Amino acid sequence: MGIELTLLGRDYCHLCHEMEVALRPLADEWSIAVTVVDVDANPDLEARYDELVPVLLHGERELCHYFLDEPKVREYLVGIR
């Protein structure tokens, strides 16, 4: 089973778009499926992550927010493989 990450963001958020673009090469390299979720479409997610977006999650674990922390995400990925 492959790794699946969730990117929480907003359509109008430039940081969200930047994290999505920055994540693509890493996702390709590691064959990661990335699901992008609009927090404004889910009241629970909006209440929990409102000011933190973009947020990158693996399950319920927050890997980073605001900007892609590539070294931290890589370290995490090595640890779960």
Image (spheres, rainbow, N blue to C red):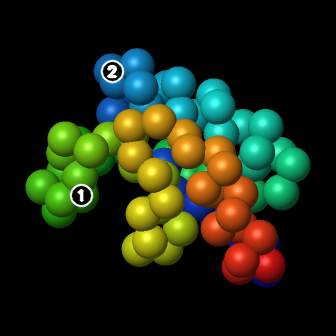
> Which residue is disc 1 drawn over?
45
- In terms of depth relative to the viewer, which is nearer, 64 or 49? 64
Q: Please give the name of the residue rendered at 24% of the width and 58% of the height, measured from the top-left corner.
A: 45
- In terms of depth relative to the viewer, which is nearer, 17 or 81? 81
**Percent position of residue 73, x then y:** 63, 56
Under mark 2, the amino acid is: Tyr
Is residue 35 in sight in this rendering? Answer: yes
**Percent position of residue 14, x then y:** 40, 19
Q: Is residue 61 left or right of residue 50?
A: right
Q: Please give the name of the residue rendered at 76% of the width and 45% of the height, measured from the top-left corner.
A: 26
Q: Secondary structure at mark 1?
A: helix
Q: Secondary structure at mark 2?
A: loop
Q: Residue 30 got which mark? A: none
> Which residue is disc 2 drawn over?
12
Under mark 1, the amino acid is: Leu
**Percent position of residue 50, x then y:** 19, 45
Q: Is residue 52 left or right of residue 75?
A: left
Q: Please give the name of the residue rendered at 53% of the width and 25% of the height, measured from the top-left corner.
A: 18
Quadrant of the drawing holding the N terminus = bottom right
Q: Residues within 10 Å of mark 2 (few under 14, many from 20)?
A: few
